Amino acid sequence: MYTCRVRVFVAAGMFGNPTEKMKREAIAAGTILGRNGYTLLQGGSNAGMMGLTLTEFLKYSSDVEAIVPEIYKSDVAGLTFKKVHLAKDLSERLHLITQQSDKIIVLPGGQGTLLELLYANESKRAMEHNCEIFVVNADGIYRGLQQQISDMRRYGLTDTSKTMISFVGTVSECFREQVKEY
């Protein structure tokens, strides 16, 4: 019997100085996904928060696929993935992320992570995909974004139905179904 694996894209930063809580959430993402039979989709790096998730996931599973633009293909050189989805550019990469994923989890990150989040939100609003989108607000890193969305609503620039994002405090809150503890 063939079982379809749930594919989860984890958006996370490659740089910076994350807090211990942020690091714990990145590791928790790898643990939960790896122990529970998910396919991990990620940006193709073993650095930073992204690397913490990947390293932990690989302790339990090798079912990892990278989604990278052609320009960054050298970043995946030397890394082993079940599959590498090469996009011709960043725009196609964003589209592939939403088309290949069943769920998107956004961990702390920089501008690239924010771009992935905003694209996923807007393309879901346009009904181009049906991925669940979760933002892990570890140590309040996305507090400013939450305030920005609130301000846009207050000024009538957007409404509740335009935001397809669920803000959560921990990675484990991204899963409604039972998962093994980490």
Image (spheres, rainbow, N blue to C red):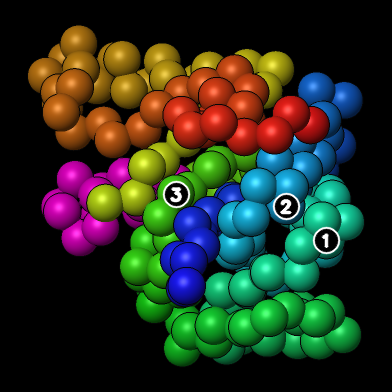
The first of marks 3 and 2 along the sequence is 2
Image point 11% across, 19% down: which residue?
Answer: 156
Where are the magenta residues, as a range?
115-129
**Residue on which disc 2 sits:** 34
Pick the quarter of the image with the C terminus: top right
User: Gap between marks 3 and 2, in whole Å?
Assistant: 15 Å
Q: Residue lying farthest left?
A: 156
Q: Position of residue 129 (x, y in %)?
A: 25, 58
Q: Secondary structure at mark 3?
A: strand
Q: Secondary structure at mark 1?
A: loop
Residue 113: mark: none
Image point 82% across, 56% down: which residue?
Answer: 60
**Label 3 neighbourhood size at 10 Å, few (<14), some (14-19), many (20+)?**
many
**Label 1 neighbourhood size at 10 Å, few (<14), some (14-19), many (20+)?**
some
Q: Quadrant of residue 161?
A: top left
The first of marks 2 and 1 along the sequence is 2
Q: Residue lying farthest front?
A: 1
**Residue on which disc 1 sits:** 58
From the image, give the main secondary structure of the stretch colored magenta. helix
User: Gap between marks 1 and 3, in whole Å?
Assistant: 19 Å
Q: Examine the rendered structure and indicate whether residue 27 appears above or below residue 48.
A: above
Q: Quick one: 62 or 52, which is closer to the camera? A: 62
**Residue on which disc 3 sits:** 103
Could you tell me the amino acid type at mark 1?
Leu
Q: Position of residue 81 (x, y in %)?
A: 73, 79
Q: Nearer the viewer, mark 3 or mark 2?
A: 2
Left or right, 20 with respect to 164, comes to right
Q: Quadrant of residue 173?
A: top right
